[in-house]
Amino acid sequence: MTIEAPVVVDARGMRCPWPALRLARAMRAEPQVLLIADDPKAEREVAALAAEQGWTLAADPGAAGPGRWIVTR
């Protein structure tokens, strides 16, 4: 069994709601997405979207700083 790396959605420089919208679009086709966003509001919006959709949201354990989340269906 091989484990594939998640698809990366790089939303740095985008203001909300764009990071959440890009995440939602990627999650249509992918079971897991790594979201990178630097808007301070992104964490709250992404958490709300994940809760609404029933997705799991976790901070990226390999991240050097904030603003990276792994989202799983």
Image (cartoon, grey):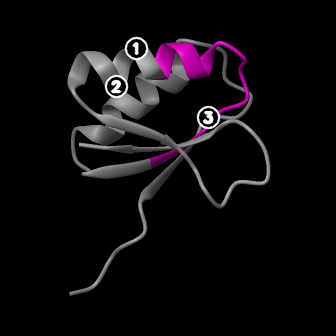
Which tag is nearer the camera, tag 1 or tag 3?
1
The residue tagged with tag 2: helix, strand or loop?
helix
Identify the disc placed on residue 50: 2
Are the residues tagged 2 and 1 within 8 Å (C-beta)? yes
Label 2 and label 3: CA atoms lie apart by: 16 Å
> In percent of the image, x 41 and y 60: which residue is there?
6
Label 2 and label 1: CA atoms lie apart by: 5 Å
- The quadrant of the rendering that contains the C terminus is top left
The quadrant holding residue 4 is bottom left
Q: Please, is residue 50 above or below residue 48 in the view? A: below
The residue tagged with tag 1: helix, strand or loop?
helix
Q: Please, is residue 52 above or below residue 6 in the view? A: above
> How many numbered discs sit on the rendered protein?
3
Q: Amino acid at mark 3?
A: Ala
The numbered mark, 1 or 3, whose residue comes first in the sequence reads: 3
Residue 57 colored in magenta in the image:
no
- From the top left corner, tell me how far across and down residue 67 is, in percent: 68, 36
Q: Which residues are magenta?
A: 34-46
Identify the disc placed on residue 48: 1
Q: Amino acid at mark 2?
A: Ala
